[in-house]
C-alpha cells in the first residue's frame, strides 16, 4: 500500500499553521523525521488508555460497528452509570467526527450522562469500514434516516424510553430534522453552534467580525476583511479569510490544533483511522456543503413536538449567535430556551463546565 504519511503530515501542518492551499508537499526528510515520533505517539496513546479509562460496576464503555442504513457504522457508548440519561452527539463538519478526540473532549460528561458518539455515513471509521463508494448515497436526508434508525436502536439496547439529542454546527441541522421527523424518540433537542439561516450566515458573520475588529482596534483584521468585502465571494479566498478571523476572535485555534493531537494519540486508533477521519471531512464537505447551504431558515424553525434548547457561544462568529437566537424565536415547542455561555463556535468543548451546567438545568424540568 502506498504510504499516506505525506497527506497526513500536510493536514497536520495545515490545521496547526493554516497553510495556504497549494503549499508544497513535505519532503521525504520531513516524513522520515515524523516517523521517528511514532514511539512517542505509542507512549502517549498508552498513557491515554490509562488516563481516560472509566471503571466501576455500572459503567458502559463500548466501541462497535452497528448496522445502520444498510451499512456498518461506528458508534462509541461511554458513561459511568448505565442508569444515566443517554445523549446522542451529532457531530459537525460535515464529516468532522468527534470520536478521534472525543474520548477526552467528553470525559467530563460521563458522570452525568451516557454519551454516544457516531461516525456518520462518509465520516471517520464508518468511511474506513465501507470505503468511498458507500458515500454515493450521502445526502442530508440519508443522514437523517440513519440518525433516526440509530436512535431507535439505542433506545432498545440501552433500555431507555427516550434519548437526548445534541447537535453541534452541521449536526444541529441534522438534529432539527431528526427531531421533527421522529419526536417520540427524543426527550429534547439541544443545539449548539446552532445553524439558524444558511443564506444569511456568512453575511451576518462578516458584519459581526468587522465590527469586532474595529471595536478592538485590530488594524490587520479590519484591512483583510475590508479587502474581501461582504459575501458572496467569487472564490474560496473570502471564506478562508472569514474563517481564519472567526477562529482567532473565538480563541479556537488552539482547540482545533488539539483535536489533531488527541486524534493521533487516541486509544485504539491507527494512522489509517486518522487518515479516514481527515478524508471524511473532505469527502463529506464536497458532497454535503452545497446541499446544506440550500437548507432554508423556514425548514429549520417552526413547530416541534418536543422541548428545544440552544446553548450557544456568546461570541460565535461561525454560526452567528444572533441567527441562533432568531431560530429559537421562531420555534413553537412545549418548552424552549436560548442560553449563551462564554466562548464561540466550539464553546460546548472549550467551556464544558458551563455547558453541562446549563444542559442539566434545562433538561431537569423536561425529565420531570
Image: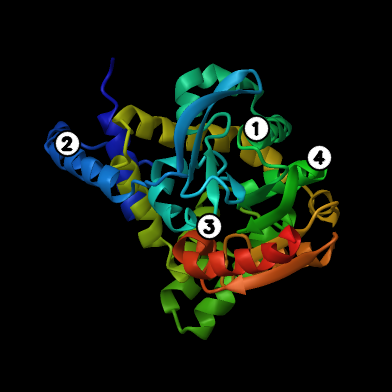
Rendered image quadrant of residue 294? top right
Mark identifier at residue 212: none
Please give the residue where the numbered disc 3 appears in the rendered image. 112
Secondary structure at badge 1 equals helix
User: Label 3 vs label 4: CA separation?
Assistant: 27 Å
* Front of the two marks 1 and 2: 1
Please give the residue where the numbered disc 4 appears in the rendered image. 181
Q: Judge from the rendering whether residue 240 lies leftward or rightward of residue 302; answer left or right.
A: left
Q: Nearer the viewer, residue 288 or 111?
A: 111
Please give the residue where the numbered disc 1 appears in the rendered image. 150
Whole-percent x, y for residue 323 in the image = 71, 65
Secondary structure at badge 4 equals helix
* Front of the two marks 3 and 2: 3
- Above or below — where is 153 with respect to 261? above
Q: Residue at x 46, y 84 (%)?
A: 217
The first of marks 3 and 1 along the sequence is 3
* Front of the two marks 1 and 4: 1
Please give the residue where the numbered disc 2 appears in the rendered image. 38
* Front of the two marks 3 and 1: 3
Rendered image quadrant of residue 350? bottom left
The first of marks 1 and 2 along the sequence is 2
Q: Nearer the viewer, residue 146 or 353?
A: 353
The first of marks 1 and 4 along the sequence is 1
Q: Nearer the viewer, residue 226 or 150?
A: 150
- Above or below — where is 86 with respect to 29? below
Whole-percent x, y for residue 293 in the image = 69, 46
Q: Judge from the rendering whether residue 68 lies leftward or rightward of residue 52; answer left or right.
A: right
Amino acid at each position: 500500500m502506498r504510504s499516506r504519511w505525506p497527506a497526513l503530515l500536510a493536514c497536520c501542518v495545515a490545521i496547526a499553521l493554516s497553510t495556504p492551499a497549494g503549499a508544497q508537499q513535505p519532503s521525504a526528510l520531513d516524513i522520515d523525521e515524523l516517523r521517528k515520533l511514532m514511539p512517542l505517539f505509542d507512549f502517549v496513546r498508552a498513557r491515554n488508555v490509562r488516563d481516560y479509562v472509566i471503571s466501576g460496576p455500572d459503567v458502559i464503555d463500548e466501541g462497535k460497528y452497528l448496522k445502520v442504513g444498510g451499512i456498518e457504522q461506528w458508534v462509541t457508548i461511554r458513561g459511568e452509570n448505565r442508569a444515566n440519561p443517554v445523549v446522542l452527539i451529532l457531530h459537525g463538519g460535515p464529516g468532522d467526527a468527534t470520536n478521534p478526540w472525543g474520548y477526552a473532549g467528553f470525559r467530563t460528561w460521563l458522570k452525568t450522562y451516557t454519551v454516544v458518539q457516531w461516525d456518520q455515513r462518509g465520516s471517520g471509521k464508518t468511511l474506513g469500514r465501507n470505503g468511498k463508494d458507500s458515500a454515493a448515497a450521502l445526502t442530508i436526508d440519508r443522514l437523517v434516516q440513519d440518525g433516526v434508525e440509530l436512535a431507535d436502536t439505542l433506545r432498545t439496547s440501552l433500555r431507555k424510553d427516550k434519548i437526548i439529542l445534541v447537535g453541534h454546527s452541521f449536526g444541529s441541522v441534522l438534529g432539527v430534522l431528526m427531531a421533527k421527523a421522529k419526536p417520540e424518540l427524543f426527550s429534547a433537542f439541544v443545539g449548539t453552534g446552532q445553524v439558524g439561516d444558511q443564506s444569511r450566515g456568512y453575511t451576518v458573520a462578516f458584519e459581526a467580525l468587522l465590527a469586532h475588529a474595529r471595536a478592538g482596534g485590530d488594524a490587520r483584521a479590519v484591512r483583510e476583511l475590508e479587502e474581501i468585502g461582504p459575501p458572496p465571494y467569487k472564490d474560496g479566498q473570502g471564506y478562508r479569510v472569514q474563517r481564519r478571523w472567526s477562529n482567532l476572535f473565538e480563541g479556537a485555534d488552539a482547540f482545533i490544533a488539539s483535536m489533531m493531537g488527541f486524534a493521533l494519540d487516541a486509544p485504539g486508533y491507527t494512522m489509517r483511522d486518522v487518515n479516514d477521519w481527515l478524508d471524511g471531512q473532505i469527502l463529506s464537505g464536497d458532497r454535503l456543503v452545497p446541499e446544506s447551504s440550500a437548507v432554508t431558515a423556514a425548514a429549520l424553525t417552526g413547530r416541534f413536538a418536543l422541548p428545544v434548547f440552544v446553548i450557544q457561544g456568546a461570541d460565535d462568529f461561525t454560526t452567528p449567535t444572533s441567527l441562533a437566537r432568531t431560530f429559537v424565536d421562531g420555534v413553537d415547542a412545549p418548552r424552549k430556551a436560548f442560553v449563551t455561555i462564554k466562548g464561540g463556535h466550539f464553546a460546548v468543548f472549550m467551556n464544558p463546565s458551563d455547558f453541562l451546567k446549563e444542559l442539566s438545568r434545562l433538561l431537569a424540568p423536561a425529565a420531570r
